[in-house]
């Protein structure tokens, strides 16, 4: 029994934490939020140089060739400082799509660039409001040209390449690699609750598109890759939840009211204890997810949905109560509480809403994997 | 990361498995499996004797109190080997319920505070199940505020050095089956409350000890009131110094919370099968989107507890001490069970009102509904546990204690408030 990270992985975690704190920690997120920049380019370059972006990409494709467990500890640290960089879109999703379903040529063309931070990838799936499902995909490819509109696309404002879900000529949902700097692509940045991770509308009118994986395999591949990404994103959420809890705890120790630290009042103390409970359950579920991700266990779909639901809730719970503990100061733009609140609520929707993942969790537990839940 | 045993662990597991397979009371297996929350389920024979005989068999083969030293009746095994034993013992582990308090809480307290002779006399029969112990802590006027207890122990005036005890304890699990009790009493009411307490152990057969079962809200009687009228305890049965009782009690309470919280299930697997069974709008409940959302909520709590436990086991396996994350176990499990039971009854519709062992789903959710309020109170209420997490884990300051530097006899209580105000 070993449900823990190795000493090397813990050292990597420390190294990434120091790197991010040296760069200013949460201040980097605020800087992007209050500027026109879509992400922090220096920070992203720094992460690439540190080898973090290519951590789980094999060496033959320009990566470092570590495991997904290493990527999990990196994700947790990015989450702690709610880093304003497109790692989730580019690494957890685009690179993972290429690794899971790309041809040798596609891998060679894009993975080294993604690992080096020279190109940014995105996943273009959504087409408007409502719960996402294959039936909602209208974008289509004919004669190698893509037509349709994808919205919202996370990091679509800064991405160089997108993995796009669209219908093939036969109408089957398939995936395509599209160079976003090529012809037939228009993009518009959208305002969002978390502008430190940009959202965009991508409009395709005859953009050259290259099939990724088999025709008609699109939804299947996307589900698998989103499961993997969900675990990595859960680690970001976990890092954010822990940090929001720590902020609230620190403030409760320092802020005096009625002649005593507010953390000595049970109303505050118990709120913080409940935040600790959420974060602890999420951490344990994330460890389960990390194990499934790294070992390729058949429980991966259950583990991914469990980690995803648990971590989404923990981050939302800790972020909203962090504001509450801070009182009025928590609602100022000056304090960092709203930065975590923005990120918590944005991440809870990325990859599909919490209710979507709840639904998938029950689906997966009741179709053949009940034992995993018991 | 992996869920595999080390080669040594695997060898130990194989040894344990084959011994259990050859020796466990398999004729009780079906009854134990059908047991409901709060009830061991053994009806074909005296359940107390069933517990004692399984414990005796284990003790004779060296499998009792695995983590205790051999000279005290234990197996001198590592914490990890104890975990493996518990996993392998499986359903038969519920036959250990009779000894949970004695072996989990009283034993460690005796081990930490008694002299060598006492340990060699008291611990082996506790380990082998020949002697059952109970914990005499809570009182009608002091539950969460344990240090406010009023049972008095005074030195006998005959020069014997004995103590004479008068007072009342309550919520004593298993007192009616116990041979010995671990008793905390007030020996000095003139000092602040935490400082005037002393710990003893006594024979429950002592003259002046009266056990009265409490009829509980769920109809069962596992808790008791225990009355003490001029009960004589030799000074040799004192644990720790006079006035050190609070410190001694912390050993017990620390062990209590670890043992109640560890490995608790919330009843989720049973809920899931209920949802495949009952219908909503003519379809299995599990297909209903509201039901699915609720199920997912219960699932992540159940699994969060399960993997929190595995993280603790990982620490043990590496020879480390598990972290503070274990303090969430009972807090999460208690509240989750209660919510889960209410949800299950709701799905059963009007039949949810039926509570029969041979009724819908064996009445198991009704049993959880009716027993879970106690889980949220016993061994540290939800509120005390949140204080502990807030103060010990997160480092928040304690509440302001108005009774901290006041002599116990001057502290206002429900009965004494008026007198204090009048004076």
Image: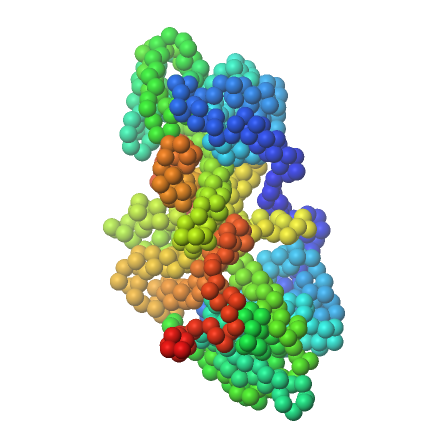
Asked if residue B43 can be seen in this view, the reply is no
Q: Is residue B386 left or right of residue B93?
A: left
The one of A261 and B64 positioned closer to us in this rendering:
A261
The one of A59 and B227 positioned closer to us in this rendering:
B227
Counting from the top left corner in percent of width and height, residue B134 is at 56, 75
Q: Split into 4 quadrants, where in the image is the C terminus of chain B?
A: bottom left
Residue A5 appears in which quarter of the rendering? top right
At horizontal 68% and vertical 76% (from top left) the residue drawn is B122
> Farthest residue toward the front?
B423
Residue B371 appears in which quarter of the rendering? bottom left
Q: Split into 4 quadrants, where in the image is the N terminus of chain B?
A: top right
Q: Does residue B157 lie above or below B125 as drawn?
A: below
At horizontal 65% and vertical 91% (from top left) the residue drawn is B158
Q: Is residue B422 left or right of residue B212?
A: left
At horizontal 66% and vertical 72% (from top left) the residue drawn is B240
Counting from the top left corner in percent of width and height, residue A118 is at 52, 15
In this picture the colour scheme is: rainbow
Query: Total number of numbered labels?
Result: 0
Counting from the top left corner in percent of width and height, residue B16 is at 66, 60
Counting from the top left corner in percent of width and height, residue B219 is at 39, 75
The one of B192 and A56 positioned closer to us in this rendering:
B192
Q: Does residue B188 lie above or below B229 as drawn?
A: above
Asked if residue A40 can be seen in this view, the reply is yes
Q: Is residue B407 left or right of residue B294?
A: right
Q: Does residue A10 lie above or below A22 as drawn?
A: below
At horizontal 41% and vertical 34% (from top left) the residue drawn is A335
> Farthest residue toward the bottom?
B158
> Farthest residue toward the left?
B281
> Farthest residue toward the top?
A183
């Amino acid at each position: 029994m070993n449900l823990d990270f190795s000493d090397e992985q813990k050292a990597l975690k420390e190294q990434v934490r120091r790197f991010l704190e040296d760069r200013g920690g949460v201040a980097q997120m605020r800087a992007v939020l209050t500027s026109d920049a879509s992400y922090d380019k220096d920070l992203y370059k720094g992460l690439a140089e540190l080898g973090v972006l290519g951590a789980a990409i094999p060496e033959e494709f320009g990566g470092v060739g570590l495991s997904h467990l290493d990527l999990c500890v990196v994700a947790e640290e990015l989450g702690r400082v709610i880093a304003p960089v497109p790692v989730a879109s580019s690494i957890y999703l685009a690179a993972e799509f290429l690794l899971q379903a790309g041809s040798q040529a596609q891998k060679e063309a894009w993975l080294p660039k993604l690992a080096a931070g020279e190109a940014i990838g995105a996943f273009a799936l959504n087409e408007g409001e409502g719960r996402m499902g294959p039936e909602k995909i209208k974008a289509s490819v004919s004669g190698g040209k893509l037509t349709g509109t994808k919205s919202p696309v996370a990091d679509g404002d800064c991405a160089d390449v997108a993995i796009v879900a669209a219908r093939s000529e036969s109408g089957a949902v398939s995936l395509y690699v599209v160079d976003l700097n090529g012809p037939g692509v228009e993009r518009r940045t959208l305002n969002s609750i978390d502008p430190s991770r940009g959202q965009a509308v991508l409009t395709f009118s005859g953009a050259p598109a290259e099939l990724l994986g088999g025709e008609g395999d699109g939804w299947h591949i996307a589900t698998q890759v989103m499961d993997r990404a969900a675990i990595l994103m859960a680690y970001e959420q976990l890092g954010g939840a822990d940090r929001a809890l720590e902020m609230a705890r620190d403030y409760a120790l320092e802020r005096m009211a009625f002649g005593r630290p507010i953390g000595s009042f049970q109303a505050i103390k118990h709120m913080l204890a409940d935040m600790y409970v959420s974060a602890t359950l999420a951490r344990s579920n994330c460890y389960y997810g990390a194990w499934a991700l790294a070992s390729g266990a058949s429980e991966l779909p259950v583990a991914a949905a469990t980690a995803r639901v648990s971590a989404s809730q923990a981050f939302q719970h800790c972020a909203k109560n962090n504001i509450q503990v801070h009182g009025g100061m928590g609602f100022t733009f000056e304090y960092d509480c709203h930065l975590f609140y923005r990120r918590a609520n944005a991440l809870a929707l990325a990859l599909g809403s919490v209710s979507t993942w709840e639904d998938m969790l029950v689906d997966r537990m009741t179709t053949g994997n009940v034992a995993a839940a018991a | 990361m992996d869920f595999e045993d080390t080669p040594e662990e695997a060898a130990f597991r194989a040894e344990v498995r084959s011994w259990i397979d050859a020796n466990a009371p398999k004729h009780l297996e079906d009854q134990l499996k059908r047991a409901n929350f709060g009830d061991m389920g053994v009806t074909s024979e005296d359940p107390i004797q069933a517990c004692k005989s399984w414990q005796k068999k284990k003790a004779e083969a060296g499998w009792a109190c695995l983590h205790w030293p051999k000279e005290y009746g234990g197996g001198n095994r590592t914490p990890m080997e104890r975990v493996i034993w518990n996993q392998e013992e499986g359903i038969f582990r519920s036959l250990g319920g009779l000894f949970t308090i004695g072996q989990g809480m009283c034993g460690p307290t005796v081990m930490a505070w008694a002299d060598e002779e006492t340990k060699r006399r008291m611990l082996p029969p506790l380990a082998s199940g020949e002697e059952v112990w109970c914990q005499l802590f809570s009182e009608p006027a002091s539950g969460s505020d344990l240090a406010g207890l009023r049972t008095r122990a005074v030195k006998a005036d005959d020069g014997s050095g004995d103590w004479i005890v008068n007072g009342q304890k309550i919520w004593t699990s298993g007192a009616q089956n116990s041979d010995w009790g671990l008793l905390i009493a007030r020996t000095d009411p003139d000092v602040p409350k935490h400082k005037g307490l002393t710990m003893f152990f006594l024979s429950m057969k002592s003259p002046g000890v009266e056990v009265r079962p409490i009829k509980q809200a769920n109809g069962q009687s596992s808790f008791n009131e225990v009355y003490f009228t001029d009960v004589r305890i030799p000074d040799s049965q004192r644990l720790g110094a006079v006035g050190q009782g609070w410190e001694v009690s912390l050993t017990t309470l620390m062990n209590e919370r670890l043992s109640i919280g560890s490995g608790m299930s919330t009843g989720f697997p049973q809920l899931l099968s209920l949802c495949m069974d009952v219908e909503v709008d003519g379809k299995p409940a599990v297909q209903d989107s509201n039901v699915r959302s609720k199920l997912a909520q219960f699932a992540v709590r159940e699994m969060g507890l399960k993997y929190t436990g595995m993280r603790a086991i990982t620490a043990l396996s590496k020879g480390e001490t598990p972290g503070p994350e274990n303090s969430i176990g009972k807090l999460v499990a208690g509240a989750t069970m209660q919510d889960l039971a209410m949800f299950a009854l709701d799905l059963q519709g009007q039949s949810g009102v039926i509570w029969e062992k041979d009724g819908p789903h064996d009445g198991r959710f009704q049993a959880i509904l009716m027993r879970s309020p106690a889980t949220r109170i016993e061994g540290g209420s939800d509120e005390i546990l949140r204080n502990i997490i807030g103060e010990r884990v997160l480092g928040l300051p304690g509440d302001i204690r108005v009774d901290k530097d006041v002599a116990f006899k001057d502290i206002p209580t429900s009965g004494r408030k008026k007198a204090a105000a009048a004076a």
